[in-house]
């Protein structure tokens, strides 16, 4: 059994067997973070793009744990230049890791952010993870896109979708995304961390059709 835990914003951990994954580890500077970067035990760090609220504590967590970073090529190269292990991937590609398969999807968004120290360009991504036979889609930061129908054809158990508007899909488009993706369960993310992305997850829940919407509070867990 794999366990997903929400640490706030777009950050989740996934524990599967002996492996501990963390996705978009923005903890330092996140007023709603469920953990401190120094407390994170992870052997893989998955990063969707270079914005500070996603790249976050990647380098510190990687150094503390001798972890491997997985992400778009530019993220991996940036980490390797800092002496961190990283696995370079790109959109449409998948790879079998010891914990399961990772495939990168498109995401319609930006990539770099001088504030995070990440000043090279690239393409943001989402992740389709196949873990213990379950499929989990983490959309990263993105607007709504029609190709979510293709992602949905893979048969998703869980989808994590941004609902905060302004920088990503808002509630109404995220509800439309659920219709495209057809996951069994959907978890809202990327809301209420800052004033610009205030959103009511219960309103999102009320608009979701065809999937179970699970509003995870920080440090809540979900079994796969
Ligand atoms: Ni972003
Ligand atoms: Mn973001």
Image (spheres, helix red, strand yellow):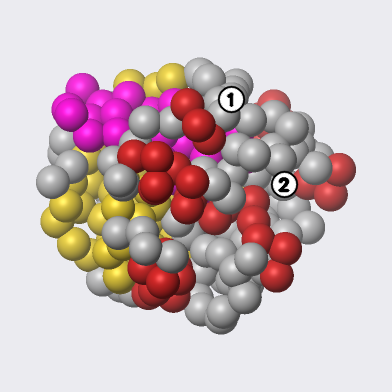
Few, some or many residues within 10 Å of mark 1 (<14, 14–19, 20+): some
Residue 24 position within the rendered picture, expressed as x and y whole percent measured from the top left = 50, 48
Residue 52 position within the rendered picture, expressed as x and y whole percent measured from the top left = 64, 56
Residue 181 visible to the viewer: no
As drawn, the residue found furthest toward the right would be: 195
- From the image, tell me which residue sits under label 2: 164
Q: Main secondary structure of the magenta part?
A: strand
Q: Which quadrant is home to the C terminus?
A: top left
Residue 192 position within the rendered picture, expressed as x and y whole percent measured from the top left = 76, 36
Which badge, 1 or 2, is on the more N-terminal residue? 1
**In the shown orientation, is residue 164 left or right of residue 160?**
right
- Please, is residue 203 above or below residue 142 in the view? above
Residue drawn at the location 59% of the way across and 25% of the way down: 34
- Stretch of the chain drawn in magenta: 1-24
- Please, is residue 125 above or below residue 190 in the view? below
Residue drawn at the location 57% of the way across and 79% of the way down: 120
Residue 131 visible to the viewer: yes
Label 1 to label 2: alpha-carbon separation: 19 Å
Q: Is residue 103 magenta?
A: no
Q: Does dot 2 land on a helix, a strand or a loop?
A: loop
Cβ–Cβ under 8 Å for marks 1 and 2? no
Determine which quarter of the picture holds residue 91.
Answer: bottom left
- Please, is residue 20 above or below residue 135 in the view? above
Determine which quarter of the picture holds residue 69.
Answer: bottom left
Numbered badge on residue 34: 1
Q: Which quadrant is home to the N terminus?
A: top left
**In the shown orientation, is residue 129 left or right of residue 173?**
left
Q: Is residue 16 magenta?
A: yes
Q: Does dot 1 land on a helix, a strand or a loop?
A: loop
Total marks shown come to 2
């Amino acid at each position: 059994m794999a366990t997903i835990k929400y640490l706030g914003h777009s950050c989740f951990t996934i524990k599967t067997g002996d492996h501990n994954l963390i996705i978009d580890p923005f903890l330092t500077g996140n007023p709603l973070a469920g953990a401190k970067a120094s407390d994170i035990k992870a052997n893989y760090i998955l990063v969707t793009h270079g914005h500070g609220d996603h790249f976050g504590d990647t380098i510190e967590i990687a150094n503390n744990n001798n972890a491997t970073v997985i992400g778009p090529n530019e993220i991996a190269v940036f980490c390797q230049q800092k002496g961190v292990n990283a696995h370079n991937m790109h959109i449409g590609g998948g790879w079998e890791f010891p914990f399961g398969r990772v495939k990168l999807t498109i995401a319609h968004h930006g990539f770099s952010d001088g504030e995070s120290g990440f000043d090279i360009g690239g393409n943001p991504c989402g992740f389709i993870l196949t873990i213990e036979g379950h499929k989990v889609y983490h959309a990263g930061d993105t607007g709504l896109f029609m190709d979510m129908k293709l992602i949905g054809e893979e048969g998703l158990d869980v989808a994590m979708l941004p609902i905060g508007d302004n920088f990503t899909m808002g509630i109404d488009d995220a509800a439309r995304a659920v219709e495209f993706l057809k996951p069994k369960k959907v978890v809202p993310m990327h809301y209420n961390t800052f004033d610009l992305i205030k959103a009511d997850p219960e309103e999102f829940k009320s608009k979701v059709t065809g999937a179970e919407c699970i509003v995870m509070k920080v440090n809540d867990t979900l079994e796969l």
